[in-house]
Image: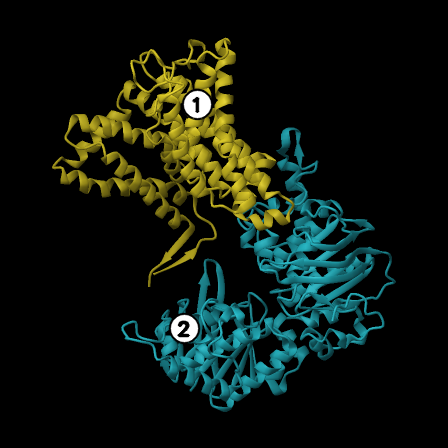
């Protein structure tokens, strides 16, 4: 079974998201689709799957053109898609999620036993172990992804599209996914693997099609490609990674001692966390998503109060946790979710740039009237200095790309010369160029004396930028480790729960 | 058919959309008018003439628009912050209660002090009526739609109790009404031989002030930010709870001032039928205006015109006045649909 995309073009207003794209996938092949964010990967896949209608071009499965804009036809032709954000009903069982929509509405009863047998058989064949009768909200992220794949296979998918499938997985889980994909291709299934992580593409794919700015740059056999050549094809020029210099750290700026946070329902989000971040150092916090990172980030943003333990900033114990107080203490915060937490998307760029300083002169005058001229002059300076592109200062923030939105947040954070910077998933969803820019800014801030905590699920990021690494699992943190003393495999084991694997000299703060 | 969000809505579309929406609702309602056997165009001509065709008609329309401007603003301010205040009707009566309490002989002041005092008292009372709902919302996450809506009935029953009991005017020959507002508290009439009173100026001033505050003040910024994205607002150091409290006080205060205008400007005394649902109509006014404070003025006059015009139309030809409610309701629905067309582009294939 083969898939071919011929000359697909899609425009959104003036933007050409896909420009005459052609590619093909042979039976039993893994084709990687590589490209920066905004290169048009997701748009192309949405056309293929019938979510969008192409302005020109066609999609052929086994030589027959799919009717445009018809998701059902795509499914019937054997195309299955696993989205980056899962589309599962949390309050239903695995079995119910998989069979949802596959049975006739007129059928008298659902044949759960037969469905269970089929799911078990597929799970065994491809190493997708998951209990069909468990509720989806009890599953781990890796298991949820397996359910998504099973869902596609249950609908007789022969061509599976995976959109950034490893972004939520530990290295070990990713390896397991790759084994599944290999088992599937051995059976004659085809896979389109969308990613911007080069090492994964090199590990799993047979051929790589590289997209840049909506157009195909080229297709190469993976065996003949390497990291550097792919990166250059993707970005269009050689990528200079920022150079990390290790400096002599100064006094601790932020100190956590035995910090405990309990979530709704009594689950320990943070459990006796002890951690210090010093001047002129970047500490990386590694961990699989959902192990307490969000709570720690909220705590250090001032939007969450711990039940127990001390938080000290510059030696002063924090009594009242408020975002305002943290801003006043020169804590710079880069939130995990730019759209939801970082900016008010429907307000203008300048309004978002002054958001943290609105309560201070010179941005308002008597009677708390906003001084538009002062605000806009300030915004204009930051837009220039931080190279924020895509909308003017009066433009709507929502229209900025992820990278430019991140630059906006960095601009308003770093312009205040923070003592401590909390960077939560600072490069999530950014392209290579933007990643380098963000990291350069963080390294500059470190050189100027700031203490930096980078929370990331991307081990490459942490190993590339941090001086020390701490692993979080189940709300507990490991002892800090020098970045030179660890590798991805060891961190992966710690992320899976074996925090003691660090076996550092000081086990302070390790609850396990 | 799919909807795609627009990046920029062209100006002509922003202006045309509400006009087209109103036109669409007129076309829809013409079916009902045809049903009564009357010629449609004649009926609409009578409606328009009754509302805007004479000095008397215009004065009546503006009189009717006065409370609608204030309750419309009350809804617009609250909805901007996504605080769903459905209780403007009750807050209006709270304002009327305060004006009656103070304005029926409790204090003796010259009009220049008395009239402002009544409005301030009414605004405070209207704001206080929202204190419990806003507290329940911010502390206990109780849905304000339920609490504000149900408080309307509580307040109306309180008014009923006062008018049948302690506040009943002994000179009213048994009618459930309060003593009249003292002469110093009565709002001056703007136009001789009409009922149009100073409350209109209060409403216009309030609209201008709310518009300017939303646009230029730090509070306005905070209200917009909290309404658009409370999580990001919190992150930036804006207190959502404090902003909600402020919004509630402003919203309730505006509705309370509507009640003051009706008691001290129009009726002269508090009765149980002081408001024929101005509080609820304010929601329609705000929605028609797409929550824009200055747009509220236009949509309040439009709604008032439909009600006044429908009265006069039903006197001239045999069409029930209920057509006004249908017109208003279908206009609001049509405007909501038209706003969708402003935000999204429709793709046919």
Q: Residue furthest front?
A: B165
The image's colour scheme reads: by chain
Q: Which chain gets the cyan colouring? A: A
Determine whether A71 is above or below B223 in the image. below
* SS at circle 1: helix
Residue at image position (57%, 58%) is A401
Quarter that holds the C terminus of chain B:
bottom left
Determine whether A368 is above or below A348 in the image. above
Residue A450 visible to an observer of this rendering: no
Judging depth in this view, the residue of B30 and B45 nearest the camera is B30
Sort mark 2 into few (<14), some (14-19) or many (20+) by Cα contacts within 10 Å: some
Q: In the displayed structure, does residue A346 sit left or right of residue B339?
A: right
Image position, residue A370 (x, y; %):
62, 35
Residue at image position (86%, 63%) is A247
For the residues carrying marks 1 and 2, which lies nearer the camera in this image?
1
Image position, residue A493 (x, y; %):
70, 78
Quarter that holds the N terminus of chain B:
bottom left
Asked which quadrant contains residue A237, the reply is: bottom right
Q: Which color is chain B depicted in?
A: yellow
Q: How many marks?
A: 2
Output the chain of dot 2: A
- Circle 1 residue: B97
* SS at circle 2: strand
Q: How far separated are the C-alphas under marks 1 and 2? A: 70 Å
Sort mark 1 into few (<14), some (14-19) or many (20+) by Cα contacts within 10 Å: many
Residue A57, labelled with which disc?
2
Residue B185 visible to an observer of this rendering: yes
Image position, residue B149 (x, y; %):
41, 39
Residue at image position (57%, 34%) is B216
Judging depth in this view, the residue of A147 and B68 nearest the camera is A147
Judging depth in this view, the residue of A136 and A470 nearest the camera is A136
Q: In the displayed structure, does residue A468 sit left or right of residue A157?
A: right
């Amino acid at each position: 079974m083969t898939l071919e995309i011929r000359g697909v073009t899609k425009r959104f207003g003036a933007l050409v998201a896909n420009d005459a794209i052609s590619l093909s996938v042979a039976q039993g092949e893994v084709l990687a689709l590589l490209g920066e964010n905004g290169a048009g990967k997701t748009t192309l896949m949405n056309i293929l799957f019938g979510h969008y209608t192409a302005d020109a071009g066609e999609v052929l499965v086994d030589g027959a053109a799919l009717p445009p804009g018809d998701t059902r036809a795509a499914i019937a032709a054997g195309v299955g898609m696993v989205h980056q954000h899962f589309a599962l009903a949390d309050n239903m069982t695995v079995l119910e999620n998989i069979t949802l929509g596959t049975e006739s509405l007129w059928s008298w009863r659902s044949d759960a036993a037969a469905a269970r047998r089929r799911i078990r058989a597929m799970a065994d064949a491809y190493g997708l172990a998951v209990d069909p009768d468990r509720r989806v909200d009890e599953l781990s992220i890796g298991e949820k992804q397996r359910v998504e794949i099973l869902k596609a296979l249950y609908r007789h998918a022969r061509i599976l599209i995976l959109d950034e499938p490893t972004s939520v997985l530990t290295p070990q889980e990713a390896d397991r996914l790759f084994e599944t994909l290999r088992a599937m291709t051995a059976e004659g299934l085809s896979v389109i693997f969308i990613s911007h992580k080069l090492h994964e593409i090199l590990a799993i794919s047979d051929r790589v099609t590289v997209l840049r700015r909506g157009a195909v740059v080229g297709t190469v056999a993976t065996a003949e490609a390497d990291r550097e050549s792919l990166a250059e094809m993707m970005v269009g020029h050689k990528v200079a990674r920022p150079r990390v210099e290790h400096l002599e750290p100064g006094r601790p700026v932020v100190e956590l001692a035995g910090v405990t946070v309990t979530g709704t329902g009594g689950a320990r989000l943070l459990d006796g966390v002890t951690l210090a971040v010093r001047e002129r150092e970047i500490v990386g916090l590694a961990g699989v998503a959902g192990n307490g990172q969000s709570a720690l980030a909220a705590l250090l943003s001032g939007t969450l109060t711990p039940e127990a333990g001390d938080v000290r900033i510059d030696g002063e114990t924090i009594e009242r946790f408020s975002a305002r107080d943290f801003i006043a203490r020169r804590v710079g915060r880069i939130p995990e979710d730019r759209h939801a937490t970082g900016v008010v998307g429907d307000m203008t760029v300048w309004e978002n740039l002054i958001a943290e300083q609105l309560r201070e002169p010179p941005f308002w005058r008597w009677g708390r009237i906003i001084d538009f001229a002062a605000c806009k002059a300030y915004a204009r300076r930051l837009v220039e200095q931080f190279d924020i592109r895509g909308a003017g200062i009066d433009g709507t923030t929502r229209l900025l790309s992820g990278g430019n939105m991140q630059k906006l947040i960095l601009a308003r954070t770093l312009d205040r010369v923070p003592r401590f910077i909390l960077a939560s998933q600072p490069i999530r969803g950014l392209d290579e160029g933007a990643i380098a820019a963000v990291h350069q800014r963080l390294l500059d801030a470190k050189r100027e004396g700031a203490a930096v905590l980078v929370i990331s699920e991307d081990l490459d990021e942490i190993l590339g930028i941090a001086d020390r690494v701490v692993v979080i699992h189940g709300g507990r943190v490991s002892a800090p480790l020098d970045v030179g003393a660890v590798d991805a495999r060891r961190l992966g084991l710690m992320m899976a729960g074996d925090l003691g694997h660090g076996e550092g000299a000081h086990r302070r703060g390790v609850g396990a | 058919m799919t909807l795609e969000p627009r990046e920029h809505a062209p100006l002509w579309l922003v202006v045309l959309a509400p006009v087209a929406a109103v036109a669409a609702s007129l076309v829809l309602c013409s079916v009902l008018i045809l049903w009564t056997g009357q010629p449609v165009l004649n009926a609409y001509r009578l409606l328009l003439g009754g509302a805007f065709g004479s000095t008397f008609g215009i004065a009546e329309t503006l009189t009717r628009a006065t409370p609608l401007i204030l309750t419309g603003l009350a809804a617009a301010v609250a909805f901007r912050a996504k605080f769903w205040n459905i209780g403007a009707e009750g807050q209006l009566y709270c304002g009327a209660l305060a004006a009656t309490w103070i304005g029926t002989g409790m204090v003796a002041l010259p009009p220049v002090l008395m009239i402002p005092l009544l409005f301030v008292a009414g605004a405070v009372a209207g704001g206080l009526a929202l204190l419990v709902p806003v507290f329940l919302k911010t502390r206990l996450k109780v849905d304000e739609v339920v609490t504000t809506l149900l408080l309307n009935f509580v307040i109306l029953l309180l008014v009923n109790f006062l008018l049948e009991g302690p506040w009943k005017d002994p000179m009213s020959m048994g009618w459930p009404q309060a003593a009249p507002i003292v002469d110093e508290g009565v709002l001056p009439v703007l136009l001789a031989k009409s009922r149009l009173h100073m409350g209109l100026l209060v409403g216009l001033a309030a609209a201008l002030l709310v518009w300017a505050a939303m646009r230029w003040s730090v509070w306005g910024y905070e209200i917009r930010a909290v309404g658009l994205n409370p999580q990001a607002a919190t992150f930036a150091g804006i207190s959502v709870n404090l902003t909600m409290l402020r919004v509630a006080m402003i919203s309730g205060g505006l509705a309370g001032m509507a009640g003051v205008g009706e008691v001290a400007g129009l009726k002269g005394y508090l009765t149980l039928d002081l408001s024929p649902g101005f509080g609820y109509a304010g929601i329609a006014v705000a929605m028609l205006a797409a929550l824009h404070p200055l747009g509220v003025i236009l949509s309040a006059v439009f709604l008032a015109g439909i009600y006044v015009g429908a009265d006069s139309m039903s006197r001239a030809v045999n069409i029930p006045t209920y057509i006004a409610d249908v017109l208003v309701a279908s206009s609001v629905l049509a405007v909501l649909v038209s706003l969708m067309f402003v935000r999204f582009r429709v793709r046919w294939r």
